[in-house]
Structure formats: C-alpha cells, structure tokens
Amino acid sequence: MTDAAELRDRTREFLAANPPADTARQDFLRARFDAGLAWVHFPEGLGGLGLPRSLQAVVDAELEGAGAPDNDPRRIGIGLGMAAPTILQYGTREQKERFLRPLWTGEEVWCQLFSEPGAGSDLAALGTRAVREGEHWVVDGQKVWTSSAHLARWAILIARTDPDVPKHRGITYFVCDMTDPGVEVRPLRQITGEAEFNEVFLTGVRVPDAHRLGEVGDGWRVAQTTLNNERVAIGGMRLPREGGMIGPVARTWRERPELRTHDLHQRLLKLWVEAEVARLTGERLRQQLVAGQPGPEGAGMKLGFARLNQEISGLEVELRGEEGLLYDDWTMRRPELVDFTGRDAGYRYLRSKGNSIEGGTSEVLLNIVAERVLGLPAEPRTDKDVAWKDLAR
Amino acid sequence: MSDLLYSEEEEALRAAVRDLLTDHCDAAGVIARIETDTPHDLSLWKSLAEGMGLAGLLVPEDRGGQGATHRETAVVLEELGRAVAPVPYLTSAVVATEALLACAEPGDLLAELASGRRIGALAVGLHTAPRAAFGTVRLEGGALYGELTGIADAAVADVLLVPADDGELYAVEAGAVTVVPQTSLDLTRPLARVVLDGAPGRRTGDAEPAVRRALRAGAGLLASEQLGSAEWSLKETVRHLKDRTQFNRPVGGFQALKHRLAQLWLETVNLRAAARNAADALSTGEDADLAVTVAQSYAAPVAVRAAEEALQLHGGIGMTWEHPVHLHLKRAKADSIAFGTAGAHREALAELVDLRAP
C-alpha cells in the first residue's frame, strides 16, 4: 500500500467495522492501534503501517469526519512525543510490544525524569545514581520539573551508572515504574499559583534490567532521540491569523477603546507584525516538512515563540490598566493540561515566563543555532575529559 | 494559504542570476564604480535584461514580456540585494513596469521596458509609501512644468513616468527634461532631481491607480531585496568570525557574539517567510495589501540591523571604504525609507486589521 487513496479506503473499511457511535472509546482506540492507523509511520504490528509520516493526515481527516474519538494527545504529549520515538528506536521487541499500545491509547500516561536540581542546562551532569544488583538497578536521586508525574504510570529516566568516566559516557536510560514504593511525587508550586510540575524523589527504586533502553553507558545518545523529538513537537503547530497569544490582546484593543494609548498602540502593532511573521515562519516550516525538505528553521521556532509570548502578555497586562492589578485566582491546583493562552492576562504573563526556560533555555537554544546551524565554534570546555565524580558541583 | 517555498524553477533562476553576478558584479568592482560619474552598471543590466530576459518577468507574454510572476521577480531581487548590484531592476522592471500595467494606454513602452532595451523610472520620490501623497508637475498648454526630487535611477532612465496635476500619468523622454544627480546615501541606487520646463509628454493613463499599484509592488518586492542583503551580512559575518582569531581563539566561539548571530539568523528566517508571503500574495492578488504591509513593517529593521551587526562584528575592517559592508549598510538604511518606513507601514496596518489608534 503506497498512496493516499488506498490508505483512505483502508481507514473507511476500519470505520465500517468499528463504527465510532457503537464502539466504546477505549475499544475503538485499541482497534485503531491494532489496525495500524494509530501512527502510520510506525512499523506494522506497532500501531503503524510503515508509511511516510505525512500520510497520517489522510487517516486523521477520515476519522475526524466520522466523529471518531481521539486519544486526547495533549494529555499524553510526553508519551507520544518523547517516550514513543525513543522506545521505537532503542527498545527491544518485548519493550515495544509491552509499552507502545497502552501509551498510544492513553491507558498509561508517561512522564520524563530528566532534569535535576543540579542538572538543568547541563543535563549530562545529572547525579541520580543507578546501581546494579543482579537483574535489577537500584535508583536513588531527585528529579524536578516533571509534568504529569502525579498521573503517570511510567517514566523515561536517565541515571548515572558509572561516576568514574566523563559525564556523557556514564549515563544509562531506563523505563521507571511510577508505582514503585520508592517513588515519591510532590507538587512543585509555580509563580502562577498552580503546580503543573512536580518534584520526584527516588529512594531505592528497583528497575528491572529488562526496562533498560539501549546499552549501559549509552543513555546520553538515547536521550538525544527524546530531546530532538521534543523540539520537533514544539515547531509543528498550524495557527490561523491572530491564533496565538496576540488574539486576546487584539480583541481587547478592539472592544475597549477607552484603554488605548499611543505608546501601547505602537507596541501592539509591532508585536502584531512579529506574531504574524512568526506564524508565517511556522507555516513555511510546515510546508517544507510536507514537501520533504526539512530545514534547520525549526531550531529557532521556540526561541521566537517564547519571547513573543512574554512580550505580548506583558503588554496585555499593561493595557488592562486597573484590571491589570488583579489576578483571577491564586488557588493551588494540579492541572492536567497546560494552556499557555488560557485564563486571564495575568496568568498568561506569569506562565509565559516559563517558555524561555522549559524544553531548553533560550540561551542554550541560541548556542545550538550558532553551533549547529551557523557552524560557529563551541566555547572551550573544561568538563569533557574529566570523570563525573571529579566535576565541580 | 500562500505558497512560501521556492519551486525548482525558481531555484534554477536563482542559480543562473547568482552565477552571472558572481562573474560580473564583485564587490570591489561595485566600490570602484560608485566613485565615478556612472555608478550604474549598464553592461550588467544588459546581461540581466536582454541576455536573460529578466526585465519582462512581470509582463504577460502577449504584451512582450516573459509572463512570469512576482514570485520569480522576488528571487531575482534576492540575488541583486545580495550583490548590492547597481542596476535599475527594481525601479524599471518592477515599479515603472507595474505603473504601465495599470495604464490604459501604455503604448509600445511596456514591451520596450520588458525587453530591457529601454529603462523607465516612475517620477515619484523613492521615500513615498504606497498610500502616501506624491508630487505632481503642472500641465500647461500641453507641456509639463515642475520639479520632482528623490527619483531613483533617473540618471539612467530613457523615459520617465510623470504624474501631472490633471490626474494623468505622462511618459516623458529623458532627453526632454533635465536630470540633476543628488548626492545619495546609497550610491548604488542614486537619486536625482528631475526638472521639466515645457517638456512634452504622452498620456498613458490615470496616475493615481498606476502609482498606487507600482508603489505597492515596489514595497512588497523590496522585502526580497532586503532579505538578500540581510543574508549576505549574516553569512559574511559568520565566515569572518570563524576565521578571525583573538585571545588565541576564533572570536566566533565567544558566546556574546554567537548569540547575536543566532538572533540575526532567526530574524532572517522570519524575513524570508514574510518576503515570500508578500511575493506570493502580489502574484495572486489575494490579501496583497496586508501581506505587503506586514513584510515592510518587518523587513527594514532586520536588514539594517544585519548590516550594522556585520559592521560591528567585523571590527575595524568593517569601517573601511574597501570592505563591502558599507554598501549593504547604505543600501539597507536607504531601503528602510524607500516606499515608506516600517512605522508608516504599521500605521497602514492599523486600519487594515482594525487596530485603531487612540
């Protein structure tokens, strides 16, 4: 099967055999996975058909037209966007068969145990230790900024298995069971008042060696797959004009002429233009991907997105004047979904401060653009040939 | 949604133009030429226009042109911007040609401009925004009287398209007027004062729609020229910072400099999307006012900053007459005023998208 028409027929046959109106949601999603229509670029037997990724749109359009339930991708973004491609690339046959189906259907939520209090931008310096004991690894350490940890069944985890070699070489990648008694999840309250993220304390957590992804000591390389997929996921959204953070502020401007000042007008127009140009850049990137000409432009999307969100939401608070002095609600909650453009201007202003930190700080991303896209030399390093245990910390 | 990519044909066209410019428009030659009384490179113009047929891209085949669109024209302008080529392409093949395309009686002139055998210039100041007021000359007893300033490339124009106070646009032979060069910031697109003292003119059509259409196309496609220049500035600066060693290291390894170049790269990536969107919108006519306004609200600050960063990061050499960075700085700064400043375009945008002033 190679073309869109055949795939469309196959999707229609599937819909005829599993009518969405008469099929329970979970059963429908499992059947869709088993029919290879979950993610067509995955191999047959693992929810896919080994087809180009771009053909997924054919399936999605048919299913949407038939009113089929989806797997609520925003709720399981870490599993879909980061864990799944890594398991696909590095997992054993048993691991792929065990993990991918409930990951995709959303029956099992995933989280990511990467960042630590002492390892943020310098993730490879992480200190969570994993020590081999027979067929298990015993894990001790602390992870942080873990979204969905309180909902997750599984985690992708990187831990130090050899402190005597330079930091990039002594890391191993695991799948960690979040129901292990040694796992303790504590909400981490943010400046917005909410706790989207958690701290995760690992004390004597026993991870079977069968849950290791990739070779012992090769975890840094495995983690690159995870991190590269994170950045791809951030670049690919398609927005209408005024579809992002600029939308609410433009509407307020139109509806509330009494709030307008000349200074705000100049700043608003400038940001409106930048938001529109960023939208066009995203659209161009999408067209490149569809045409099979992926360029390096994706590396920069998150940088622009972070700065714009911050400036636009800052302007919006100011525009609201007296109301800008208020905040909708400081109640501590643990939201399941993150909505950057949700709630009021004050929330958007505070939440967007995280956009230039999460998923790689803007400073690190500028280094990546400078070194990988422009080919400029790296800063001289003092940590490359030093055993992890001898690094300053 | 606009097509924001380059087609294979457009890439082939780019390669051909770039080859020609590499062979015939090196920076040292341009710098030598701008110090003479004849800064324009008319032999390069002949190769582009007559040799490659690029002057007629916007003109339909049945009217003597190539029947291409603003998309291909934009690709040519990217390359001309990269080389700061001193040729009257934007002024004759885009602006004057678009004005004639809007006229009821362009006569043979349209085909003559399309073939590149003659050069035309719209006698409206280069600083004029697409919707701004423009100067006119007096029509008296069938002849034209008056003076217009800031006319780009008038020095090499064979014919001027002159708006008169009767609301008509007249084609006036260059031999019938006095063209006085003005000392210009951008020596590669020099301005001139045009004096008409009883000059005869041939009526071509209504001035207002012709000028509006010409300036809109000029503004929209200028963004592609600005993109070419910004890309040159970025590329040359990256190259320099990889080579240049201080403190026993290539200076391009210092984070303070890397971040500035990465930021500039992001802005050129954005400018490419905005410029392609404007070119595509001009070619389809869909949402063209908005696309041009967005592109011109964004382009100039990027192109100017690219040239300014190039100068600063080249250190002392960037300040010399010998190094081509000043060609780009002067062109980019002049372009930031050409066809309206970014601020003027943002003001126009306020109406287009209903974000009104207080």
Image (cartoon, coloured by chain):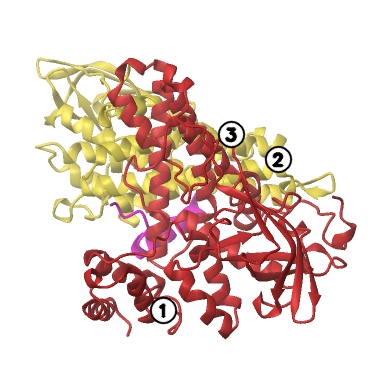
* Residue identifier under label 2: B256
Would you say A15 lies left or right of A116 here?
left
- Look at the image and give the residue range highlighted in magenta: B1-25
The residue positioned 59% from the left and 56% from the top of the image is A373
Q: Position of residue A43 (x, y in %)?
A: 45, 81
- Out of B133 and A226, give the one closest to the viewer: A226
- Out of A7 and B130, give the one closest to the viewer: A7
The residue positioned 17% from the left and 41% from the top of the image is B101
Of the residues shown, which amino acid type is indicated by label 3?
Glu
- Name the chain letter of the residue that bears numbered label 3: B
**In which image quadrant can residue A58 be found?**
bottom left
- Out of B164 and A334, give the one closest to the viewer: A334
Residues at marks 1 and 2 touching, judged by CB atoms closer than 8 Å: no
Q: Colour of chain A?
A: red
Q: Residue furthest front?
A: A181
Of the residues shown, which amino acid type is indicated by label 2?
Ala
The tag on residue A48 is: 1
* Residue identifier under label 3: B308
Identify the secondary structure beneath mark 1. loop
- Name the chain letter of the residue that bears numbered label 2: B
Q: Nearer the viewer, mark 2 or mark 3?
A: 2
